[in-house]
Amino acid sequence: MDKMDKYIKDSKSGMTPIVKTVVRFVMGIIFIFGAYVVLYGHLTPGGGFAGGVILACGFIILTLAFGKGLGLSKLSDTWASILDNSAALLFLTIGFIGFSGGYFFTNVLGKGKEFALFSAGTIPLCNIAIGLKVTASVFAVFLTLSIFGRFISKLVDDYEDDTEKE
Amino acid sequence: MILYFLTLVLFVMGLYCLVAKKNIIKKIIGIVITEYSINLFLVLVGWRKGGIAPILLKGMQKSEIVEKGVDPLPQALVLTSIVIGLGVLALMVSICLRLYEKYKTFDMSEINRLRG
């Protein structure tokens, strides 16, 4: 709590204190709603992609309001990349588990009771894997376009300058 | 029928934005509106009055699904299309940022030094 107060009073990074205070209240609701959409993907409209985009928007709104210091401390670019790749592998693993019951993506787990949270076999697991992947990759796209965009284009310019000299 | 006509109106609005505007960001918005109108059209094609989810539950006749069930193919197709649209949007925005850093403008008519 003290850390967040410090970030709100810090006027150098991010937006005005009004935006910061509102984001501080709304942030938790956004993350809970995103997790709800991911977890209930097999019962209600939504699913891994929609919930993942909502979760990524939570991180993006955090970065926009408080500056890159807080945003990168919650989910850094390295961890976004790791989460992105490992969630893709997790989704593939769930697909390969299906081979134990026949073919690719066979629903080998018990179906459970209809319309219960823990039902539908491997479909909620797929949703969670997709949700993690979309969260990490959309946030990584945002970071690449906003924070590291200048850095990457500087690298490209340096490369072009070097090739022109040669 | 009027809903199909409204998606056509949305499509034409996006196409107008894409053709008539000079700002690249507005062109991107036009592409996205066009894309969403096509998504909406495909979802409308799959719509059915009083439709049920195409899941065969216990004690349900197969003929009931044939009569009332919704075709899941347009929805799956549109979900894939939305994901691809997000990727294309990120690519377009990144190209725009690169163009802005090279030419210091978003105006299409001023970017006339494109020689590959």
Image: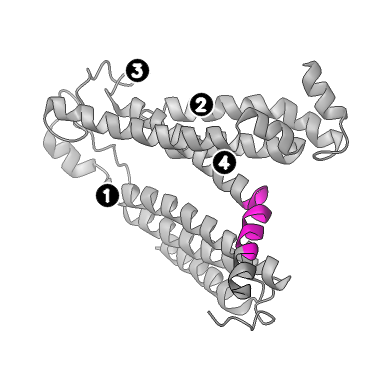
Tell me residue A17's x, y (percent).
85, 33
Residue A9 locus on image (x, y percent): 88, 28
On what subunit does the disc labeled 2 rest? A
Q: Secondary structure at mark 4?
A: helix
Q: Tag 1's secondary structure?
A: helix
Q: The numbered mark 3 sits on a residue in which chain?
A: A
Q: Residue at x 13, y 25 (%)?
A: A101
Tell me where residue A100 appears, x and y as whole percent.
Answer: 14, 25
What is the distance, in whole Å, between disc 1 and disc 3 at their CAs? 25 Å
Q: Nearer the viewer, mark 1 or mark 4?
A: 4
Residue drawn at x 69%, y 66% is: B101
Quarter of image, res A129: top left
Seen from the viewer's position, the closer of residues B93 and A81 is A81
Measured Cα–Cα span from mark 3 to mark 2: 17 Å
* Residue type at tag 2: Ala
Q: Which mark is residue A139?
A: 4
Asked whether the residues under marks 1 and 4 belong to the same chain, the reply is no
Give the residues in magenta: A145-158
| Same chain for the residues under marks 4 and 2 in the image | yes
